[in-house]
Amino acid sequence: MKVDMWSEITCPWCGLGNHRLERAVERFEHGDHVQVIHLSFPLSSNFPEGRVFSVREALLRQHGVGGSRAEASTRRIETMAGNEGLAPYRVLDNKVGNTDLAHEFLAHASAEGKNREAWDAVFRTYFGQGEPVFSLDDLLRLAGELGLDREETRQALDRRRYRQQVQDDARRAQRLGARGAPFIIIDGRYGVPGAQDSDTLLELLRKAWDETHPVTLATGGDLQVCGPDGCAVPERD
């Protein structure tokens, strides 16, 4: 069963949503058969490349939110993340910038077979350590940590080899109904907007699995075939 998750790497709800999805898959009885694919949904392309801004400045500039409102909303996310096992989780005191190159790095890492490892590393670096993930040097450092060839990574990013793929991934999410990030599609059946709690995600994983995996039970010597709509006992010869 496949689960697609679209995220913006500087979105605090996306980092928390990734954590909640991981916990749901870990608790799912068939978690070993779930493939989670992370995809890009850039939301900061309007920021100039090569510059970073404080989260406080960005909230005021983009959303008109500042002062006590910015403090309350971001500290609330930090507290929630801490209560769910993500500590530290830096939001308000972090920096933001154009993430297009970072998403292209993630597409490159995914092409090299490191989809989950790369996304986890970026979220951990950005929210857990409060370090930037915007410049070529930032991303080449992560490439080394992930065991990616630095020169191949440099060439992929210099040539913007994955720019179109990142844009196509975001458009696909929009066609499926995404209006923001995070956005999850479970088994091509259920669209899940926002950072839903792990209990909700676990329930949807179970529902999607049950709808596509009929169970065969042995009862009193008869094989009872059960599907999502009921059970039928095969006729005797």
Image (cartoon, grey):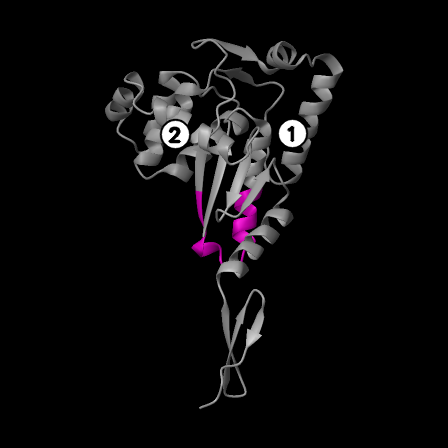
Please name the amino acid that badge 1 sits on.
Glu
Q: How many numbered marks have been drawn onto this rendered protein structure? A: 2
Which residue lies under the disc numbered 1? 78
Start-end of magenta stretch: 20-36
User: From what the image shows, is residue 236 above or below residue 190?
Assistant: below
Q: Nearer the viewer, residue 115 or 190?
A: 190
Up/down of 29 relative to 149, above or below: below
Q: Nearer the viewer, mark 2 or mark 1?
A: 2
Q: Is residue 80 magenta?
A: no
Q: Is residue 23 magenta?
A: yes
Residue 106: assigned label:
2
Q: Quadrant of the C terminus?
A: bottom left
Image location (x, y in percent) of residue 222: 50, 85
* Secondary structure at numbered mark 1: helix
Residue at 53% x, 29% y is 128
Q: Quadrant of residue 103?
A: top left
- Give whichever of 108, 93 is nearer the camera: 108
